[in-house]
Image: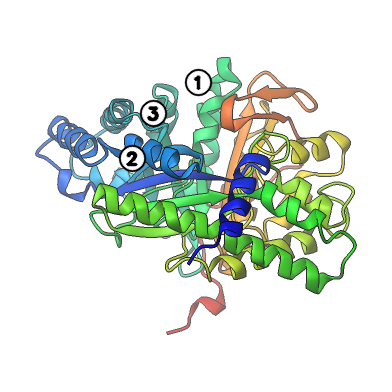
């Protein structure tokens, strides 16, 4: 039985603390859409997406109106396109046709993003995988709603360094093709280690091959709620701090569970998971950086930051798993520089560097996210940064990711403007000492010894 106090408390979270359901994401399998050629496959893809997701946006809006809970985004994730197009796409241009079909389908049903223009290549690349990866720059430059990801490593298989090298080159090409928008195309691409099959957040969402034909996944977000709760226990010891975060995460996740179940019932689609990540926005008061400051840091990046983030992430997970029957996706704390005002401030103040962010990614949910770097950064340097982050995921048996934006024509200290939820970012310096010989070796970094658990 829900008490009136709980109702009032939830209303306060929404109206004063930026609590929202960040996304309802419908996962759709496209494995049954493969036709005799790319044109037939595109036709089947368009028909399936526009049939399954025709009521997704309306349902989200109706639930939001009924409960007074903001549902910011409605999105779609699909089977990795390299698998769907593998038998019919003979060139990168064929894959771009599929990307444009996805974009049209997304526009037709009214979602803001569609994710799954993806390949899974942690142990090696098929010809189709390589063609898709090479098509990513044109696909992202010629579409508005398509998001792309590539999984290049895992704890079980190691890191595919051939793919890492190729992706460094593709990121620079994507940046160049969208340079008139501060290289915006790169904001829609993520490279993963240990990518989950059920992540509802963009740009890394795809519908894994182990999933049902169609599912509903929900991502909740409440950095402002956690920040406000911690203000009430300022100066208290770590036990009180941890209990407060845990209880708050429970309440936030219950909201996500409610929305997920309601959307599942209305759309007659199975409920998948609730991703209980703390995902910030550029809005004041909706910041993971502010939480870290409330815990006791002058800025994110100060000594103690990694410990504070580890504490936060763990308590969010402990509170969240009690609130939903199925928790999945990424679940924890996101630290995207461009989407978090206090993280932007920390970079501008000199408190937060790329190297410190890398250390923080050992204990957060994702990795180096939405980081703008100089447009003249070499492809091998980008590949080296990716390799470092993939190694953290592989060794620590966790999901890590990289979303770097080399902003063509801009350098350290200048600002890149991406707009909307993507925000803006100060361009951060990178270590420009060479790693070309390392990246050019080719092959695969083997799986770590602790991957052998059979």
The residue that appears at 61% across and 33% down in the rendered structure is 405
Q: Position of residue 70 (x, y in %)?
A: 51, 39
* Label 1 CA crowd tier, 10 Å (few <14, some 14–19, many 20+): many
- Closest to the camera, between mark 3 and mark 2, is 2
Q: Position of residue 396 (x, y in %)?
A: 61, 68
On residue 139, the disc is 3
The image shows residue 30, relative to residue 249, as above or below, that is above
The residue that appears at 73% across and 56% down in the rendered structure is 360
Residue occupied by mark 2: 59
Q: Earlier in the sequence, mark 1 or mark 2?
A: 2
The quadrant where residue 393 appears: bottom right
Measure how far apart labels 3 and 2 are at the Cα level: 29 Å
Q: Position of residue 166 (x, y in %)?
A: 49, 41
Residue 193, visible in the rendered structure: no
Residue occupied by mark 1: 177
Measure how far apart labels 3 and 1 are at the Cα level: 10 Å
- Closest to the camera, between mark 1 and mark 2, is 2
């Amino acid at each position: 039985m829900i008490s009136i106090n709980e109702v009032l408390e939830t209303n306060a979270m929404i109206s004063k603390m930026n609590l929202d359901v960040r996304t309802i994401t419908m996962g759709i399998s496209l494995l049954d859409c493969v036709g005799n050629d790319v044109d037939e496959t595109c036709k089947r893809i368009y028909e399936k997406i526009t049939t399954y997701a025709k009521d997704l946006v309306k349902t989200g809006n109706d639930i939001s109106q009924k409960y007074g809970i903001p549902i910011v985004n409605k999105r779609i994730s699909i089977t990795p396109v390299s698998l769907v197009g593998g038998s019919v796409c003979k060139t990168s241009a064929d894959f771009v046709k599929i990307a444009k079909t996805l974009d049209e389908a997304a526009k037709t049903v009214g979602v803001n993003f569609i994710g799954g223009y993806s390949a899974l290549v942690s142990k090696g690349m098929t010809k189709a995988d390589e063609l898709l990866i090479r098509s990513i720059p044109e696909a992202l430059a010629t579409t508005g709603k398509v998001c792309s990801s590539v999984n290049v490593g895992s704890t079980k298989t190691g890191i595919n360094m051939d793919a890492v090298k190729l992706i460094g080159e593709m990121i620079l090409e994507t940046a160049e093709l969208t340079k008139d928008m501060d290289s915006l195309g790169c904001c829609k691409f993520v490279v993963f280690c240990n990518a989950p099959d059920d992540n509802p957040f963009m740009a890394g969402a795809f519908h894994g091959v182990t999933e049902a034909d169609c599912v509903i996944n929900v991502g909740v977000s409440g950095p402002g709620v956690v920040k406000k709760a911690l203000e009430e226990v300022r100066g208290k010891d770590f036990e009180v701090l941890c209990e407060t975060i845990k209880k708050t995460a429970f309440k936030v996740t219950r909201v996500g569970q409610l929305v997920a179940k309601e959307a599942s019932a209305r759309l007659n689609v199975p409920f998948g998971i609730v991703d209980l990540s703390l995902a910030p926005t550029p809005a004041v008061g909706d910041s993971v950086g502010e939480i870290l400051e409330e815990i006791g840091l002058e800025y994110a990046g100060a000594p103690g930051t990694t410990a504070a983030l580890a504490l936060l992430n763990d308590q969010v997970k402990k509170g969240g798993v009690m609130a939903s029957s199925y928790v999945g996706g990424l679940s924890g704390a996101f630290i995207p520089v461009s989407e978090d005002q206090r993280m932007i401030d920390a970079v501008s103040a000199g408190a937060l560097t790329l190297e410190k962010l890398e250390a923080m990614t050992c204990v957060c949910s994702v990795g180096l996210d939405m980081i703008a770097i100089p447009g003249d950064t070499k492809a091998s340097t980008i590949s080296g940064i990716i390799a470092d982050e993939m190694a953290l995921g592989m060794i620590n048996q966790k999901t890590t990711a990289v979303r770097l934006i080399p902003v063509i024509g801009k350098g350290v200290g200048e600002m890149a403007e991406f707009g909307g939820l993507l925000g803006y970012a100060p361009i951060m310096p990178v270590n420009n000492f060479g790693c070309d010989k390392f990246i050019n070796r080719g092959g695969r970094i083997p799986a770590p010894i602790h991957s052998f658990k059979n």
